[in-house]
Amino acid sequence: MYQCFATQDVIVNNHLSSTKGYVPHIDNPDNIKIKSKMMIPLIVRDTFIGIVTVYTSIKKKKNFTKNDLEVFEALKPLVIDAIFRMNHNSDNGLVVDRRKATKNTSGFNRRKSDMIEKLESLEVKKEQKRSPEEILEITSNIVHDIRTPANGLLGFLEILGEKIEDKRLKEYISHAQKSAALIETLTTSILDGVSQKSEPVSSKGKEMVGVHRFFAEIAEVFSANMYKKNIDYTIYIDPYLPKMIELDSMKMKRVILNLIGNASKFTPEGASIAFFVVYKPEKNKLHISVEDTGIGIAKEKQKDIFEAFQQAEENTKEKFGGTGLGLAICASYVKEMGGELLLKSELDKGSIFYFDIPLVKIDKTMHLEPLMNQNVFICIVCDKSNSMVMNVMVKYLIQFGLAKSQMKAVSNMMNIPQETSHLIVFENKMNDDLMSLIQSTGLKYLVVEENFLALDAGSYPDATLISQYAYYGDILYTFINNNKVPKVLVVEDDTISSMLLISMLEDEYCEVDVAFDGEEGKELLSKALHANAPYDVVYTDENMPLLSGGEMIKAYKELEKSKNINSPLKTVSISGKVNESIDGGGFDFLATKPFNKKEIVAILHDCVG
């Protein structure tokens, strides 16, 4: 009330009792169960003469809108006139001048006429609803305007990816590219549907996907936002999921993006969010869940939120944004994939959204094979703030085949056991003394990055780096695996061809590098050989700038002979010449263009046994 008086402006409050500055004995003197209240100042010739208040009770909930304000603005002249009449009656001892009374009556009639005209205009405006064609046109214009910056973002990310050398940054840029590409695909689909006056295509259907890469790319889209919001973010993808499964990839992406996005929106700073993908072999089902320690949802509201345009609380949109449409879409898509989106939640304690979907077509080959006879002892240097990430790491290590007796957590370097072979150190525990110990003992070590993209690989020579905001299962597996990981080099001057090959190999358990001409390829091969970490396989084109594929291989083979290498480099020609002689070109294998993933992967397995 005071704010309305002081500012002489309209005040609309749809959640009065929870508003800062609400004073019950002033704003609600009759102790009515008010939900919403609108206060309109009455001003005549710069003179403040009063306030009109309109309210709704909690028994009949209503949010005041712009239309309501327009109606009461139209009624204002009538109220002002009533106040003047009340102040000029005989009960107040005032003498009414007939000339003034006539003038006032004339003014009242004019104001009454204006008021009726405004109200009629508002009623006509209310009745004039947009036609479906108009709505469709507005929608298509908005979607088109979304697609334009998405295309620009995609192009910018592609350029950025080419310029940046840091592998971890390139990985995040790749995830961002795929998110921008998803926006472009969805908007194009909608516009195609509008142009054909039919339902937009929401999915491209089922396809075989590499499970770990697929889910990691979606989840890591949120890594930077989680870090900025100081949320403990866990991505756990079952190490022993089938290597490839058939999914409706577009629908699955939209479901997970919505669920993690919602969790991020409704989880306060300092809380936690976890994304889990688990395989249930006995039921041949995929279990997916998103868990948060956010604001939670009241039990009586939990059924409603899966309905379109429904939200947990009436002020949710004002506080957090959104339309209440996302969960309805998720529930629909999960149902179409053969599952049911379920919820467990408690107010102020958090929520778990989860579902199972049946797997019809799978590649039963495991993405990671269980580690056998690993003679290792792992020491984790951390403190209490790292407990959540450490627990997930231990879960991974146990699933890889290690026993709890093969690992220990300590808070300082003085307590590192002598039998330690592998050291995992959290960023906050890394210091010069610990680095000196690592260098003097030759310990194999891994550093966990706690501040997003804060660590420079150059500062930690020979270290394995992981981010606690990313999926790190594969890297952790490689770190403790005493078996050699195959090293692969792709040498191809055509960017599209090289990226296609990398995408075909990325689901295999190998380390892949790329060079864009023969000279660069020769340099990478030579450096690796001199560092006693030679490449196992090279996929190379023949016709390239500076040095052909054949010349590059010939030069390297001569260097290889001088080093007496026991396991020589396996070479694969990707020049696309069907009739090319393998022996004549100095190659072990030939991959024809256009590339076939099964052929590319089969050659890799033949090369590395």
Image (tube, rainbow, N blue to C red):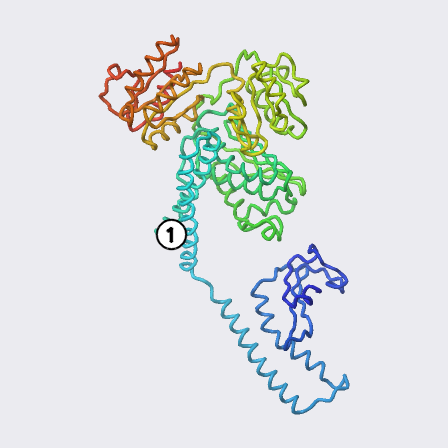
What is the tally of numbered marks visible in this picture?
1
Residue carrying label 1:
194
Q: Residue at x 29, y 26 (%)?
A: 546
Question: Badge 1 local density, few (<14 within 10 Å), some, or many (20+)?
Answer: some
Is residue 282 in view?
no
Horizontal and vertical percent for residue 423? 59, 19
Quadrant housing residue 235: top right
Left or right side of 447 for 41: right
Label 1, secondary structure: give it: helix
Q: Nearer the viewer, residue 412 or 342?
A: 412
Q: Residue at x 42, y 48 (%)?
A: 149
Horizontal and vertical percent for residue 278? 54, 28
Quadrant for the N terminus in the image: bottom right
Horizontal and vertical percent for residue 389? 61, 28
Q: Nearer the viewer, residue 271 or 369?
A: 271
- Callout 1, which amino acid? Val
Q: Is residue 530 above or below residue 111?
A: above
Left or right side of 247 for 424: right
Question: Which residue extends farthest left?
Answer: 579
Q: Nearer the viewer, residue 573 or 347?
A: 573
Left or right side of 582 for 278: right
Is residue 528 in view?
yes
Horizontal and vertical percent for residue 129? 47, 64
Q: Is residue 263 above or below residue 588?
A: below
Quadrant for the C terminus in the image: top left
